[in-house]
Image (cartoon, rainbow, N blue to C red):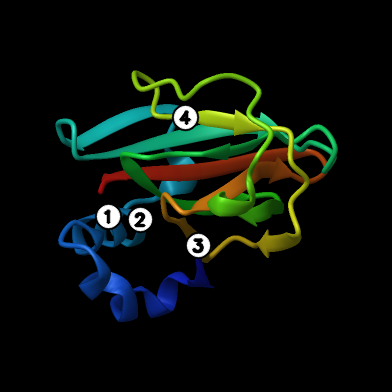
Amino acid sequence: MVLDSLKNCDAYVALHPLFKQAFDFLNQNDLSSMEPGKTVLIEGKLTVSIMETEGKTPENAKLEAHQRYIDIQTVISGSEAHGWLPIEACKQETAPYNAEKDIIFFTDTPTSRIAVQPGEFVIFFPEDGHAPCIGQGPIKKAVVKVLV
């Protein structure tokens, strides 16, 4: 898991061959004017989804993980926190892994909470269980899916 400012994203482009393109999209587009929906940058490898949701209590945020995709998430407006728990500590699956949606949910309790403000990003790797959308009021965010 990584948390940092979008101003520092160049420090992370070496972590994955598609990170530069992902960060370029986040930094070169007016995300606040984009409507909710999905933008395909590279079919099956790199997508950006703009989402609008209401914040959830920590108890109502579902702990999830992915196997095939890395998440880069950034807040466009509002304030969001994520619960975090390493995947090896996630023991209480709510259902088997859904390969089509690349997601599995758990009822385990996160051990940490990470606050993300506009202008910041968080990267969740397959080894990171995360419970997104913790907050109050409306949250607009971008979620980049990067094929591992």
Instruction: State which mark lies toward you, 1 or 2.
Output: 1
Q: Which residue is mark 1?
A: 22
Counting residues from the N terminus, which is met first, the one under dot 2 or under dot 3? Answer: 2
Numbered circle sitting on residue 103: 4
Residue occupying image coordinates x 14% and y 31% = 43
Q: Is 13 placed left or right of 97 in the picture?
A: left
Q: Position of residue 2 (x, y in %)?
A: 49, 68
Q: Which type of secondary structure does the marked residue at label 3 adopt?
A: strand
Q: Quadrant of residue 38?
A: top left
- Say whether marks 1 and 2 touch (CB < 8 Å): yes
Residue 79, compared with residue 58, is above or below; it is below
Q: Is 1 placed left or right of 71 in the picture?
A: right
Three-letter residue code for mark 4: Ile
Three-letter residue code for mark 2: Leu
Instruction: State which mark lies toward you, 1 or 4.
Output: 4
What's the distance in space between the residues labelled 1 and 2, CA to CA? 6 Å
Numbered circle sitting on residue 26: 2
Q: Which type of secondary structure does the marked residue at label 2 adopt?
A: helix
**Label 3 CA crowd tier, 10 Å (few <14, some 14–19, many 20+):** many
Counting residues from the N terminus, which is met first, the one under dot 1 or under dot 3? Answer: 1
Q: Which type of secondary structure does the marked residue at label 4 adopt?
A: loop
Residue occupying image coordinates x 27% and y 55% = 22
- Say whether marks 1 and 4 touch (CB < 8 Å): no
Residue 10, compared with residue 34, is above or below; it is below
Q: Position of residue 92 (x, y in %)?
A: 69, 33
What's the distance in space between the residues labelled 1 and 3, CA to CA? 12 Å
Residue 77, compared with residue 121, is above or below; it is above
